[in-house]
């Protein structure tokens, strides 16, 4: 027979086939992950976002067709880093009336303009005053940073899929 005591212990019958059974502490639930400022991870993701964005530029800017394999890898890492930044920065939710980032047209012919747009979105995000002015947090700046991050996440996810799809055709 088990029951919970006031102290949070599980009480069991003291005699079990002639043995004394000790009360056990209840198992604690795994702690929930709350949005938080993890400065080391934010710094790492912020720097890698810029480095991978430069890789994306190399994939898209060369003469001839873009390097779709490198572009897909870069877009995947950009998305992963942007998602983690969105979680760790704890930016405010977007107001319902705020315009979202407009996505470019889809299709094989639109890959290069989409890659350029992703690069520009990342550049706009990393140049945000949110990261330049340490002691001042402007709600509008933080909201724009969130909008840019959400646009980066959406566009990089779509680009990864498109690059993999169209890159498979040419090989």
Image (cartoon, rainbow, N blue to C red):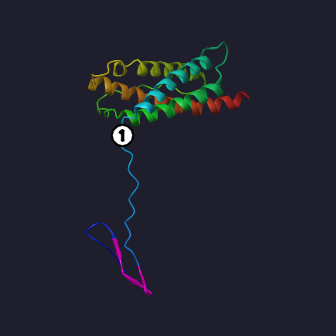
Q: Is residue 148 left or right of residue 54?
A: left
Q: Quadrant of residue 126?
A: top left
Q: Is residue 12 magenta?
A: yes
Give the residue pinned by disc 1: 35
User: Which residue is drawn at the image coordinates 37% and 73% (left, top)?
Assistant: 23
Q: Which residue is situated farthest in the top direction here?
A: 63
Q: Nearer the viewer, residue 120 or 22?
A: 22
Percent coordinates x, y for residue 62 in the rendering: 64, 14
Q: Quadrant of the C terminus?
A: top right
Q: Quadrant of residue 161?
A: top right
Percent coordinates x, y for residue 8 in the rendering: 30, 66
User: Which residue is drawn at the image coordinates 63% and 25% (left, top)?
Assistant: 70
User: Which residue is drawn at the image coordinates 25% and 69% (left, top)?
Assistant: 6
Q: Which residue is situated farthest in the bottom direction here?
A: 18
Q: Nearer the viewer, residue 100 or 149?
A: 149
Residue 104 visible, this angle: no
Q: Is residue 63 magenta?
A: no
Percent coordinates x, y for residue 82 in the rendering: 46, 31
**Total numbered badges shown on the rendered structure:** 1
Q: Nearer the viewer, residue 55 or 7?
A: 7
Q: Nearer the viewer, residue 138 or 171?
A: 138
User: Which residue is drawn at the image coordinates 64% and 33% (left, top)?
Assistant: 165
Q: Quadrant of the N terminus?
A: bottom left
Mark 1: which secondary structure?
Answer: loop
Q: Which residues are magenta?
A: 10-20
Compared with 47, 29 (above or below) is below
Q: Is residue 49 left or right of residue 86?
A: right
Compared with 15, 28 (above or below) is above
- Dot 1, crowdedness within 10 Å: few (<14), some or many (≥20)? few
Residue 69 visible, this angle: yes
């Amino acid at each position: 027979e088990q029951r919970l005591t006031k102290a949070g212990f599980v009480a069991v019958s003291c005699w079990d086939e002639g043995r004394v059974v000790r009360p056990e502490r209840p198992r604690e639930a795994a702690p929930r992950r709350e949005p938080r400022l993890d400065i080391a991870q934010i710094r790492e993701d912020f720097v890698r976002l810029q480095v991978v964005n430069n890789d994306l530029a190399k994939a898209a800017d060369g003469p001839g067709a873009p390097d779709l394999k490198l572009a897909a890898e870069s877009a995947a890492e950009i998305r992963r880093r942007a998602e983690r930044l969105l979680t760790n920065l704890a930016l405010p939710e977007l107001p319902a009336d705020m315009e979202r980032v407009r996505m470019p047209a889809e299709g094989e012919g639109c890959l290069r303009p989409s890659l350029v747009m992703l690069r520009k979105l990342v550049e706009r995000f990393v140049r945000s005053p949110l990261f330049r002015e340490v002691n001042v947090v402007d709600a509008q700046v933080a909201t724009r940073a969130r909008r840019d991050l959400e646009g980066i996440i959406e566009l990089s996810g779509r680009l990864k899929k498109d690059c993999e799809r169209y890159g498979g055709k040419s090989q």
